[in-house]
Amino acid sequence: MLTHQWTRGLKAVGLGLVTLAGTASAQQATRDMPGPIDSLQDLQDSGKMLFKTVDANNDGQISQQEAVDAANVAVGGLFFAADADGNGVLSKEEAQRARDKALAAKPLARFLISRVKSSTANANPAGGTPNPAAVAMTLVDSNNDGQLQATEVRQIVQTTVQGLFAAADTNRDGQMSPVEVNAAIAGAIKAAGQASFQAADNDNNGQLSRAEFDKALVDPANAIFAVLDANNDGQLSQQELQSAQRIIGQQIQRSILPEAPNSPRHLIQSGRKPEEVAPVPNFPTTPPATVTTPAPTTAPAPR
């Protein structure tokens, strides 16, 4: 029950951030923000790059093995970064330190998690709040020893990829084409909408009454209010709103990466060569010569 409430609250926070992010970005942005078409194009370009990266044999499709290999690289990098002592086992303490380190660099995520935990604790004073890291470790820790072995991480990657292919590989050829990937994304969005409808349909009659619809709107609003109400006094002051907007605005500004003047797009538009915009380094075409150290000579033994 607590896990469900925590997850629902976190999702609700995401809805509120859309509104707050718009306000904060409008107040703090120093240049024009990209429009929806630009953002969609950037998303599509990123998706194509990701697809080509995973498609190791460049055949225009992603096999299960390619998906597993790519996921192992991504998840394995996180695992080994958190495995401070390098013993191939991730303890709860190491997982907590890795989580704290990641949140230290992401003030927005730290702000949201702290507020959601606080609001959930106030709503459930007897039960406390579930630790997201502990919940994740419980799901992955197959032998229940309180630690994560590399074999357990690999197994959860394998299981996840197999489940994804079972649902998204509609022609059952063991490959994921770009068409199937796009269809899977559309299916995931549709499933999310259906899940939201079912969660709001309390009497399970397949319809939303006015009361159920109102409650579906009010519950997320209450969760957002609890996140913003820093001192838990049941009221939102201007200082609390400004604090939330400042944190969100700073995060948005950090996430904006300006396009470099020597990007392919800018070079094509300006007709300039790369070396006309920025120095182009010269890389050697042959490996550097190997320096060999002569073996020490042994002096003849005296007669």
Image (tube, rainbow, N blue to C red):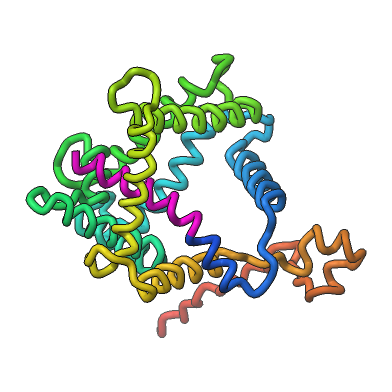
Q: Which segment did they paint magenta?
A: 1-19
Q: Which residue appears farthest toward the front when viewing the image?
A: 210
The residue at the far right in this view is 271
Q: How many marks?
A: 0
In this view, the residue in front, 115 or 160, is 115
Q: Residue 125: give x, y in percent of width and height.
A: 11, 53
Q: Position of 255 compared to 245: left or right?
A: right
Residue at image position (26%, 49%) is 132
Q: Position of residue 109 (x, y in %)?
A: 38, 60
Q: Magenta includes 79? A: no
Residue depicted at 60% across the width and 65% down the height: 256
**Residue at 61% in and 37% down:** 56
Pick whichever, 294 or 240, lies toward us: 240
Relative to residue 51, is residue 254 drawn left or right?
left
Is 218 on the left or on the right of 4, as rendered? right
Q: Quadrant of residue 105?
A: bottom left
- Overall secondary structure of the magenta stretch? helix
Residue closest to the eye, 111 or 119? 119
Residue 243 in the image: x percent, y percent?
A: 39, 73
The quarter holding residue 260 reads: bottom right
Q: Residue furthest left?
A: 126
Say above or below: 165 vs 271.
above
Give the residue drawn at x 28%, y 23%: 203
